[in-house]
Image (cartoon, helix red, strand yellow):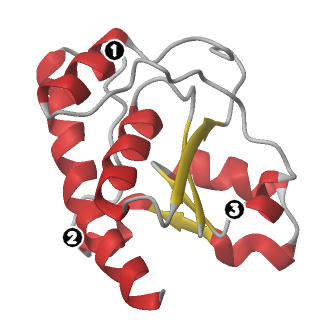
Amino acid sequence: MKILMLCMGNICRSPLAEVILQNKLGKDFTVESAGTINFHEGKSADERSIKTAEKYGLDLTQHRARQIKPKDFEIYDRIYCMDEDNYRNARKLTTDAHQDKLHMMLEVLGGTIQEVPDPYWGEMKDFDYVYHLLDKASEKISEELKAEK
């Protein structure tokens, strides 16, 4: 199964989500990430995301940002969006046949927080908060995906 994590620039939230979920799922699954804009294309993950990942034993040093493409909807089985804007932008890129592949990252938690906040303009504590939200959601997603397999 192939999974894509999606945020705006693919340097903060989606790379963190990628390494967290990949770590939980193991080698039987492929988890990658992309952004809805190409502003950071080819760049490394944000240094604060790299440091946050390292803090929890994960490695983001090889990450390079990329923009989502319409063909990704054929390649990936599930696409998890970090917020409503990215969800709407992704919906515009695909046909009705692939709409069911799109999910909000935090929907599995069923709580009042519906979106993963963008920590880009924040501080390290904001990246840590995002990490914990993504970790919690990834745990549930991992359980669901492993049960389906």
Q: CA distance from mark 2 to mark 3?
A: 26 Å
Camera-nearest label, 2 or 3: 3
Judge from the rendering whether residue 40 lies leftward or rightward of residue 53; answer left or right. Answer: right
Cβ–Cβ below 8 Å for labels 1 and 2? no
The residue type indicated by label 2 comes to Gly
Residue at image location 32% in from the left, 28% down from the top:
59
What residue is pinned by disc 1? 121
The residue type indicated by label 3 comes to Tyr
Kindly state the secondary structure of the residue where label 2 is placed: loop
**Residue in front for this viewpoint, 104 or 101:** 101
Residue at image location 45% in from the left, 48% down from the top:
82
**Residue in front for this viewpoint, 47 or 36:** 47
Q: What is the quadrant of residue 9 in the picture? A: top right
**Residue in front for this viewpoint, 25 or 133:** 25
Q: CA distance from mark 1 to mark 2?
A: 25 Å
- Looking at the picture, how far across and down is residue 20, in whole percent? 31, 47
Residue extending farthest to the bottom is 148
Camera-nearest label, 1 or 3: 3
- Residue 144 to residue 34: above or below: below
**Mark 1 Cα-neighbour bin, 10 Å: few <14, some 14–19, many ≥20:** few
Pointer 2 or 3: first along the chain: 3
- Looking at the picture, how far across and down is residue 113, in whole percent? 25, 58
Kindly state the secondary structure of the residue where label 3 is placed: loop
Residue 111, numbered circle: 2
The residue type indicated by label 1 comes to Trp
What residue is pinned by disc 3? 76
